């Protein structure tokens, strides 16, 4: 591979030629190396990447991982992954060879993360620490599965932090009523929170809604997409999971409210967003309404919990609720088990009755 000395700048340039996976001849080059040794090191890394040689550096493998994975996940998911890799992994492992990173290196990195602070000077949360380790382990797993790395050193060490706490907050119907009365002064806010509370949809699903998603003859709304704002850009993606694509039946009053709201939006097109705001707007309105109503402050996502808890209280099954909110029924059973207080008692009572009947017959 040619390496040239550029006399005008007194730097080195590398021209790298290779054959890609389609059998096509390609060429890339890089200028500005201070020494010939640096140019040769860059050239060697390119050869290792092309040959999928795990002797490459962590930084080089990140480029390979990016090429493999970026187009396979949602843009917002990749944005999160990329930020973690760039800010928490590359500074520590970037120049190390993949094949030479061992468990003690992972332990040393974990210790650094455990001492880390967020932008407000607080230690990283247990949930965030677990997320950092999961991303590092995922990258090594990719190297093991597809590029011949012998083992995953992050997996051998084990995780740090802990999973998201299962505790959740929610409003009762009375608390929500007080809140909604306080935000009626802003129609957009009122109708947005009506959809969140009475349908149990996610924020992104709400913000992606258009007039075309509503069928007022059938009184339904179709959830087929989600809104995200990334790097100053508004993007529409698929919902969170395949199960999230669903059709929700609206209660009569909510169908009437949404028809009224759409009529108020002069000139709106069928594919225009009904709630042309961001999640930050909803967050501010949540605080404003809760303070004015004198109810406890909860997260916007907790309105989803509030809807589910209301349905449980009304006696609907986990399967029926899961279909409405776009969950797996097992998730409803597991995450909201504490809201089914009578289930075990009912089971015991019915088993007692059955036993009595059998004893009497006998």
Image (spheres, rainbow, N blue to C red):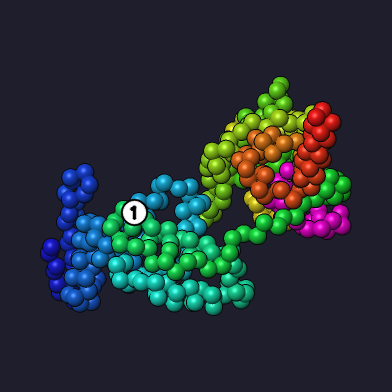
| Front residue of 83 and 185 | 83
Left or right of 92, for residue 113 = right
Percent x, y of residue 333: 67, 44
Residue at (35%, 51%) from the top-left corner? 68
Percent x, y of residue 212: 62, 29
In the image, farthest residue toward the front: 362
> Which quarter of the picture shows residue 40?
bottom left
Height in image: 287 above or below 126? Answer: above
Local crowd at mark 1 within 10 Å, few (<14), some, or many (≥20)?
few
Can you identify the residue that label 1 sits on?
145
Which of the image's four quarters has the N terminus?
bottom left
Height in image: 277 above or below 262? Answer: below
**Is label 1 in a helix, a strand or a loop?**
helix
Residue at (29%, 56%) from the top-left corner? 147
| Front residue of 223 and 2 | 223
In the image, farthest residue toward the top: 217
Would you say residue 294 sits in the magenta stretch?
A: yes
Q: Do we see residue 350 in this rendering?
A: no
Would you say residue 176 sits in the magenta stretch?
A: no
| Front residue of 160 and 91 | 160
The rendered magenta stretch, by its main secondary structure, is classed as: helix
Height in image: 105 above or below 259? Answer: below
Residue at (64%, 40%) from the top-left corner? 329
Left or right of 216, for residue 223 = left
Percent x, y of residue 34: 23, 76
Which of the image's four quarters has the C terminus?
top right
Residue at (67%, 36%) from the top-left corner? 319
Left or right of 292, for residue 165 = left
Percent x, y of residue 32: 24, 71
Q: Do we see residue 139 in this rendering?
A: yes
Which residues fall within the magenta stretch?
286-310
Left or right of 112, for residue 125 = right
């Amino acid at each position: 591979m040619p390496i040239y000395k550029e006399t005008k700048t007194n730097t080195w340039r590398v021209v790298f030629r290779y054959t890609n996976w389609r059998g096509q001849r390609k060429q890339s080059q890089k200028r500005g190396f201070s020494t010939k040794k640096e140019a040769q090191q860059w050239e060697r890394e390119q050869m290792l990447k092309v040959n999928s040689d795990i002797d490459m550096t962590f930084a080089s493998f990140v480029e390979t991982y990016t090429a493999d994975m970026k187009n396979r996940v949602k843009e917002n998911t990749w944005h999160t992954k990329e930020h973690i890799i760039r800010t928490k992994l590359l500074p520590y492992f970037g120049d190390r060879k993949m094949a030479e990173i061992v468990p003690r290196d992972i332990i040393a990195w974990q210790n650094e993360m455990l001492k880390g602070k967020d932008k407000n000077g607080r230690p990283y949360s247990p949930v965030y620490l677990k997320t950092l380790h999961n991303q590092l382990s995922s990258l090594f797993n990719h190297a093991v599965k597809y590029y011949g790395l012998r083992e995953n050193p992050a997996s051998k060490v084990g995780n740090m932090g802990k999973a998201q706490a299962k505790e959740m907050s929610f409003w009762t119907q009375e608390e929500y009523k007080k809140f909604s009365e306080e935000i009626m002064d802003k129609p957009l806010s009122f109708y947005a929170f009506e959809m969140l509370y009475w349908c149990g949809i996610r924020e992104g699903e709400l913000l992606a809604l258009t007039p075309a998603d509503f069928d007022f003859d059938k009184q339904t709304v179709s959830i087929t997409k989600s809104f995200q704002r990334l790097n100053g850009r508004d993007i529409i993606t698929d919902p969170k999971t395949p199960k999230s694509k669903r059709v929700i039946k609206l209660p009569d009053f909510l169908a009437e409210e949404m028809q009224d709201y759409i009529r108020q939006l002069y000139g709106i097109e069928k594919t225009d967003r009904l709630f042309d705001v961001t999640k930050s707007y909803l967050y501010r309105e949540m605080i404003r309404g809760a303070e004015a109503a004198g109810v406890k402050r909860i997260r916007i996502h907790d309105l989803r919990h509030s809807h589910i808890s209301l349905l449980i209280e009304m006696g609907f099954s986990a399967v029926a609720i899961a279909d409405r909110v776009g969950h797996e029924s097992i998730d409803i059973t597991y995450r909201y088990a504490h809201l089914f207080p009578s289930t075990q008692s009912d089971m015991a009572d019915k088993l007692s009755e059955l036993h009595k009947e059998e004893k009497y017959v006998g």
